[in-house]
Amino acid sequence: MADKHGSGLRYLALLVVLLWPAVSAADFLNPSFEGTIQNVTPYPDTFPQYWRLRNTDHTLFGSQVTNAWKTDGVYAAGLYSRLRKTFAVGDSQSLWQSVDLTGMSGVMFDVRLASYGNSAFPTFMNFEAQVLVDNAVLWTQTVDGAYLNQQVDVSGMSGTHTVELRIMATVAGVSQAANWTQWDNMRLVKMPEEKIIDAKVTVVPRVIVRKGGGKWFKWEDRWVTCFIELPEGYSVKDIDSTTVTLEGVSAHVGKDRWAKAESNFWNTRDWDWDRAKERMVKFDREAVEAALTTTGKVTVTVTGKLPNHVKFVGTDTIRVFEKCGHKHGGRCSDNCIRRFALDKWDDKCGDEGGKKCDGKK
């Protein structure tokens, strides 16, 4: 009876160890595969602690720690095809672990693809090494050799995600050699601290009047334009307009020369003649109007990104009105708009004395 109880306790301990990664960690547990346990399924091999095995019942594959090749410590984790086993396209086995990727920019690792056991087949073949995050393949390799400091991009991912190391058959056949993927030195790369700088931004038009019925007045066009000037030490030529937003509205990127994502002669000049170049970007007017939920004097925020994890932020104050015209529905004259821009506009679209919106005293 004592042996049965001892055996049961050993299996219970093994089950606890195998299930441990289901609780996510802020870093990999056992990242260099130095901690080991004795696995029982499908073969009694030495297995990396805190890692779980997917497709455990697939007899084509083996999984165990190995010292045949390693980059950190004395062991690496091995996934391999067994000799003289039949395989089909897509057959696979993998190690996986749940990891908290909040604030991380990448998953870095070392891996070697190699063949053992048959001198007639000296190189890795018929299989593929893969790295997946949440079942999405982010890295692959099929060519024999060692690959150090490989990295997959996980920036923008937060919370718990499943990181998986996989070997997968790319063709159907019989394994004539043991094709190994040997993994080591798993690590997370932290997102660098983002530096925020102040930018000078000018938004045009200075006055936005919501257009009932979708018709623009003669002084309007379909765009809201923004001119961005950066402080000394930064170049507006480094602004990628795909990163620029105005109140959450993305800048327009298109076929027109001024609308290219990268800086060029048509969108980067000294527009205001102050001997400092500005980057011009444009936003769809209707989208901006929808984003501006208040009227009167409104401060709008423009943001964008530069290389080396630098973010710029700038604000400008414009006027926003729900409609333009006096109580009888007359349209705004150009003179009325000029008065608006000069901050001489009241809520009834007239001068301080409440004259009609026709530009006359």
Image (cartoon, rainbow, N blue to C red):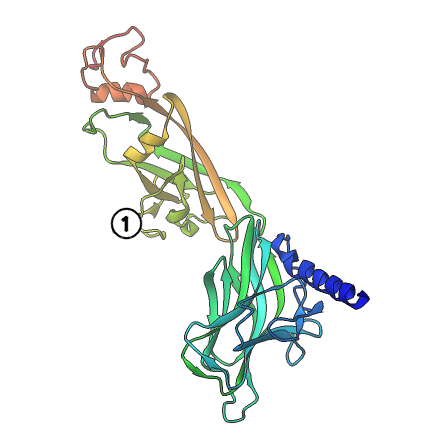
Q: In front here: 323 or 315?
A: 323
Residue 73 quadrant: bottom right
Q: Is residue 123 left or right of residue 242?
A: right
Residue 289 quadrant: top left
According to the picture, the residue beneath numbered tag 1 turns out to be 254
Q: In front here: 136 or 342?
A: 136
Q: In front here: 259 or 56?
A: 56
Picture layout, residue 204 above or below residue 55 = above
| Residue positioned 40% across, 78% down in the render | 171
Measured from the top left, where is residue 142 in percent x and y? 46, 77
The quadrant of the image that shows the N terminus is bottom right
Q: In front here: 154 or 136?
A: 136
Q: Residue furthest right?
A: 2
Measured from the top left, where is residue 135 in percent x and y? 47, 60
Q: Is residue 360 visible?
A: yes
Q: Residue furthest bottom?
A: 120
Identify which amino acid the numbered label 1 is placed on: Gly
Measured from the top left, where is residue 262 in percent x and y? 36, 53
The quadrant of the image that shows the C terminus is top left
Picture layout, residue 209 above or below residue 150 = above
| Residue positioned 78% across, 65% down in the render | 6
Picture layout, residue 222 above or below residue 257 = above
Measured from the top left, where is residue 185 in percent x and y? 63, 67
